Each structure stands twice: as C-alpha cells, then as structure tokens.
Amino acid sequence: MARVVSARISDVRFPTSLDASGSDAVNVDPDHSVAYLELIVDDPSWPSGFGYVFTQGRGNDLAALAIEITVGMLPDEDLEDMLEHLGEIGRTLVHDSQLRWLGPEKGVGHMAAGAVVNALWDIKARRAGLPLWRLLSDMSPEALVELVDFSHLTDALTRREALEILSAGQEGKAERIAELERDGFPAYTTGPGWLGFSDEKMLALIREAVSAGFTMIKMKVAGDLDDDRRRLGLAREAVGPDFRLAIDANQRWEVDEAIEWLSHLHRFGLWWVEEPTAPDDILGHARIRRAIAPTRIATGEAGANRLMVKQFLQADALDVVQIDMSHYAGVNENLASILLAAKYGKPVVPHAGGVGLCELVQHLSYFDYIVIGRSLDGRMLEYIDHLHEHFRAPVEVTGGRYRLPTAPGTGAELHPESVRTWLFPDGPGWKNLRERELVPQLRKSIVEHATAERAEVTA
Amino acid sequence: MARVVSARISDVRFPTSLDASGSDAVNVDPDHSVAYLELIVDDPSWPSGFGYVFTQGRGNDLAALAIEITVGMLPDEDLEDMLEHLGEIGRTLVHDSQLRWLGPEKGVGHMAAGAVVNALWDIKARRAGLPLWRLLSDMSPEALVELVDFSHLTDALTRREALEILSAGQEGKAERIAELERDGFPAYTTGPGWLGFSDEKMLALIREAVSAGFTMIKMKVAGDLDDDRRRLGLAREAVGPDFRLAIDANQRWEVDEAIEWLSHLHRFGLWWVEEPTAPDDILGHARIRRAIAPTRIATGEAGANRLMVKQFLQADALDVVQIDMSHYAGVNENLASILLAAKYGKPVVPHAGGVGLCELVQHLSYFDYIVIGRSLDGRMLEYIDHLHEHFRAPVEVTGGRYRLPTAPGTGAELHPESVRTWLFPDGPGWKNLRERELVPQLRKSIVEHATAERAEVTA
C-alpha cells in the first residue's frame, strides 16, 4: 500500500522585477514566484506529484507555510484509494472546521488547498501515464461530477445539471480529441502589452505576434489615459482593423471611472476589457458591462472562489470567465467554474502567464473543449513567453496555437536546477544578485517569536 | 525620535474545543486563538502596542507569519509621524504591490494588516491616555476621513459624503458621550445558544441572560431542523413573546434550503437570521431576504473586505451590518464599513466573542453612536462570557449593558501569564493537556523545507 511519506516545499522566486516583464498598472514590480510542493510517495515505483501556488514575490513564504499546514491535513491513508476520491479530499482541505475561519474559501489558505489538490492530480495522471487533459477527458460523467463541491452552488448549478452537461459531452469526444491533437488550440498573447515597454519594443512584439499566428493581443492599460490612447492607436494601426485586440486594466479603476475611461478607448475596437475594477465587485462589473456593451468584460483571475464565479454569472456581470490555477482551489474548483460557465453559456478563457500557469491551465481548456464547452467560439488560451525554460515539460506554442502535451502529469514539475538556483533568499541566483547589488539587501527582521523556552526564562 | 524597534509575535491558543464553548453548525471544534503581536518602541517612555488576528486554532501559525511579513512592510520612520498618518499606513499595508496577489484584500494577509494597524492604534491611544473610542470620538471629521480607503468604494460612498456624515455627527457629541458613560451600551448574548449545550443548560443560561438584562439572545441553528424547532420553542417559551430572539446559521444553508428551513422557524418570532448562507453570496442573501421579509438578515463577520459590505448594501441584501475585528483590516476598514452602513441607513451590530473580539470592537460601537449612527435603534453589542479573564482590561458588562472602558488603548493586551501558559504548541498549558491525553498528540510533520545548504549537498 502506497502512502505520501514526505512533502518537500521550496520558496522559489524569479527576479522578474529586474526587467519590466509582467508589469502592469497594479503589479508594478512582480517577482514571479512559486511556493513549490513535491509530494513524495514511500513506494519508489510511484512518481512524485508536483503543485504550487503562484505568487508575485512577497508572501511566497506565507504560501509555503499554508501548503505545509494543508499537507498536514491530508489523511494518512492508502494513496491509491485517495486518488479515487479527489473530490472528497479537496472538500476536506477546503472546509477544515478550524482553518476555514481564515477565509472561508479565499486567500492564501484556499490557494494552498489548490496546490495540494493539484499535486495529487499530478500523481494520478502520472500513474495513469496520461497528461491531465486526457485523464480528465477519459473520466466518466459520474466520476467527474464527484469532483465538484456543490456547497452553496445549488441555486445556480445542481449535481443533476452538471451530470447532464458532462453526459452530453461524451458524444463526439473522440473526434474533438483528434481535432485538437491535429490542430492545437488557439492562443492569444499578452507578451507585447506590458506597461513597462517602450512603444518601439511594443510594436516590434506586436508585429511578431501577428505574424506568429496568435488569435488576439492583449494590452495592459489604466496607467495614464493619454498613454493608453497612444499605445492602442499604434497597436490598432499595426494589427489592422479585424485583428482581436483586448485590454487589461488590472483592477485599477473605480466603477464610474472605468465607464468614463473606456468611453475614450472604445474606438480602438476592443475584443474585451479585463478586470476594469476590483475583482470582488460583482455589481460594479455588471454596471460597467451595461455601460460599455457590446464590448465584452473578462474577469476572474483574482476571484476568491467558485461562489464569486456563480454570482458574476447570475448577475450577468461578465462575458468571459477567466479561471485561474493559483487563486482557486486547483483542478476541482476550476472544474466547478467551467461547468457554471457552460450552464450560463459563457466561454472560459483561462488566465495564464506568471510561473507555470500556462503549463497547468492548458489542460483545463482542452478538457473544456473536449467534454464541456465543445466549441472554440471565443475560446483561447493566454500565452506569455516567460519562464517556461524552468519546466520539465514546457508548453509548446507554434503557429499561434498551443500543441497538446503528451507527457504524463499536470506539467507542474520544475527543473531541480531551477529550484536550486532561485531558492529564496539563499539560492545561488539570489546570492549573486545581492552581491552585484542588483536587488535590495534583506532588511534585518525586527520580529521575535515567542517560544515556551524564552517565556520561561523571562517569566 | 521614537521608532518601532521590535515586534514580538506569539501563537496563543486556548483549548476551547475541550468543552462545547463556541460550537456551532460549522465551527464544530474551535480552539479560540490569537496570533498576538506586541510592537515595541525603542524609547522606553513609549508604551507597546498590541494587536492580534483571532483564529479558530489551526492556521494560527499562518496568521502569525502573515503578521511578521506585514510588520516587515512598516516604514522604518518616526513613529510620532506614522501615528498621524494611520490611514496612509493602512493603505500601504493592504495594497502592497506583491503581497496583494494573495488576496487581494482578503484572507489571512488582509487580517494581518488589521492586527498591525490595530497595534499602532493601541500605541496612539495609550500615548494620548485615552481609550480608543474616546480618541476616535475626539478626532476631527477631516482626520477621520483620512483613515478611510476609498479605492473601489466611490460608487457607493465618496470622501465628500463621508465628511458630511462625520461633520453632522459633531453636533450633540458631548451629550452622547455623557449618556453612554452614564448608561452604558446595550448588549445581547450568544452565551446560551451554542449547539453543543443540552436543553437544560440552554434554558438555565437563557433565564440567567434575561434576568441579567440582556437586550437579545442569539441561538445557533442549522444542525438539524427538529432540534432547531424544539430549542427555539423552548427558548421562546422561556423568554416570553416580546423578548428579542435571533438565530445564527453560520453559513450552513444553500440559498433555497435557507428559505425552506426558515419557513419552519419563522413562527418563533426571530429578530434576525444571521449568516444564512455563504458569506460571499451577496445575491443569495438578497434572495433569502426578499423571501423571509420582514425578518431581518444579519451578516458580515466573515466578509472579505469593505467591497463586499458595499455590495451587500447596494443589493439590499442585509438589514444589520456585522463588522468584525478579525476578518477586516482593523479599525480603518471597519470605519469604512460603519460609514457605508450610515450612508445606506442600516445599523451596525458588531460580531464579538472569540478571543478579545468584545474587548476590541466595543470601541467602534461607542464611536459609531457618538459620531456616526447617533441612534441606539437596533444597535447592540454582542457579548459572550468567554476568555475575558486573559485580558488586562476585560470588558465590563452589568445589567445587560457594556460599561465604557476608561483604560487607555484598544483593550488588546493579554496578561503575560496567559500568553506564556497557552503558547502553542509548547506552553505549559498545552504540555499538561497532552500529558493528560486530553488533546491529540501532534503528528510528526512530513514536510521538509528546501534550503540552499541542503540543495547544494544533494546537487
């Protein structure tokens, strides 16, 4: 009988704030990072499973501790049996009677549950010798529906409705798999659009993206209105009138400010406006959406949980559901969101980028097409050419399309050398940068932790 | 010039799961705990400041680390100056460009910002020689409005509107202060209502609460419908037809289930129904509220942030705003919620109980009455006779009313002996319980943290 015998957790941070990669109106200095988990099985014939919480740098240690606490709640049971009940395991981790106070179902504790759930999915897929997308696609509707946490969801989606959606998706599955394996999946790119880039760099990257065959280009906005007009004008001119151009405000605007600001950008022909205001503001998004129709609203990457997705759909507050492999509780909760989107007839276009978000979330888009959404209308996968070299099985994007991975697992495994180099704060990569004075010296902590020993001495 | 020179953080847990105190339909085994912060100033003539994140046990270490990270973001500046700009300090901690990804503005990182902000308020009030409620009441409308983070709030409450509310509240302030100092503030109690209690214990406590002069009794429900009917029947019989009886479902129900379940409880004459469903479900609460009108809905204790409070008010989804000193970012964010409630004409009745939530939040109710709400209509403070003995300045409740504290500060300071005894996991209280086999032995952690040293050895 195999058991999870140890869990290795690594605080891995990449110094991306040194150039402007990943910069936008809100994330001005991201160090793209992962709190990285390896679940190790006592039987050496079993593979390890990998998962992570993606973060922007500070707080990556908090995500690591949250993963540690979550791992501590895994039942010490037969792993084979656990992998048959990943829905139940996920619900156990998400609804722990004490830990839930720190959410419930939101924040770093919730994200950590996702990392652990995903590491178990990685083991399951590797054991099956299948990439995650294929493992999910081969599962029965009954097995899939068991993964969903329907608590507080049933006014929007019942188990029976989910089962109907999944059952209907069995028809033509083999053809859709063959189609994706042959043609790949359409990708859009955010690569050219970062706020920190010069106009020249932006235009060069835009031309490159168009000729590479990408379906859409997304531009970061909301720093300065004049800049946005100039950059979007240049971008539209470069891509021509029919190419999809979207913008991303990264939550920057007030509700009324968004409506006003967007009235000036509307003429550039926007495919969608992403995160115009706070990600929690369902009613605000609904108001903005009504004001800027028919321009689409896309949001969800920084949502708290499936209950927010539910309400965004109920309130007709978005057009595009952006699931995310960091903020939500892993494969299981994203499956709930995909089913909700199907019920309400909205396309899912995942958030990707960061560290390894492309590697993970691609599987869900393929599965969505194969079994749930069954249409490519409005569907795409975000692509950013960023940090893929650190992964054992990096995504492959050619001709503007993702190529379906064949390696077993979820794609979450990093090269051990990358983990070693960029361990924070003392990996050789960070030591080197500090010696060259390229990153701030760490400030001496002023924190002292109370311990029983110390308290007894001073008492 | 005074500076914060060190921060002592203690993981303090009380073994409240040993009896049924604090048990309800969701929190079945709480160990009421605090991640406890003391900010120490380099000038010995300055007081320390205390603050904490209240938790239910597991995850208290996560809250402690979140506080550590947040303390590390405090500017290393003149403390006198920082205390004059607590609004700005609070916004800096809440909106950190990297850390915000773990929320934004939700979960344990957000709660930690509250603990740090509150510890600074404690220093400020002690330096002024005033209890927090009095310090706030004496502040000018202009100074108070600077505390509020208006980002993403302005479609519901502008700075100008907030200033108008605060300015109007200056009239008659002295009289209201005198009135509260004379008469105290009405309290309700949840003490008799825990699900774990026998009917006999419940009834004895109910009779005690009525004769002690409490304004309302709140009963936990939603475990079992027949139990709820029996317990509410007994309770209503014991208190008579006119006494305020409220119920608290602790998020247990689906939206439709809440409507159905409550149709069976309506006849017991309920003052409010608290947390009928998920705390994030604005639209669900709105639907339940319409279905059970005129019974009130109370919620907010587990809300993510002021943006959720905003939407609950905009959607007319509640009748009673329950602010909380643990989930929100401290005094500053709760001030935003109180102003929002005033704008929408809803009473604020804080969540209390736990460890020290009464001690902290009472100040905000007094301030609300003195400067903002200016009415006692529907206003109360929750009281639970639980763990107050650990505080230096415990709340005083007599004749069913809170008596206004006169000690300088926020009331957050614990007795050092309590901190020492209940340090987790190795304080003498916990050691003793483990020796007597009254609490589970700690399981050996299976987690191994990657370090640069270890990686270099194995590389």
Image (cartoon, coloured by chain):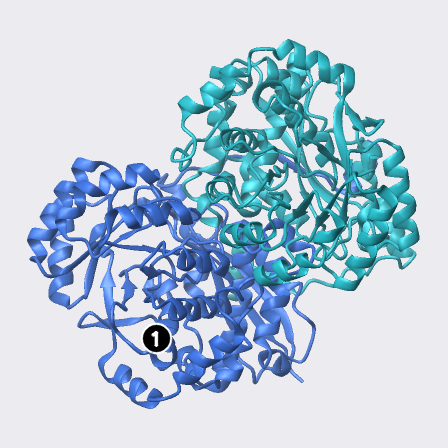
Chain colours: A blue, B cyan
The answer to whether residue B45 of the structure is visible from this angle is no
Please give left or right for residue A301 compared with residue B217 in the image: left
**Taking B137 as reference, is A324 above or below it?**
below
Using the image as rendered, state which of residue A318 and residue B106 is in the foreground. Answer: A318
Please give left or right for residue A156 compared with residue A290 in the image: right
**Taking B46 as reference, is A365 above or below it?**
below
Three-letter amino acid code at disc 1? Gly
Residue B217 image offset from top left, x and y in percent: 78, 41
**Taking A363 as reference, is B280 above or below it?**
above
* Residue at the spot 77% in from the left edge and 60% down from the top edge: B442
* Residue at the spot 48% in from the left edge and 54% down from the top edge: A304
Name the residue that disc number 1 marks.
Answer: A373
In the rendered image, which quarter is residue A112 located in?
bottom right
Q: Chain of mark 1?
A: A
Q: Secondary structure at mark 1?
A: loop
* Residue at the spot 86% in from the left edge and 48% down from the top edge: B237
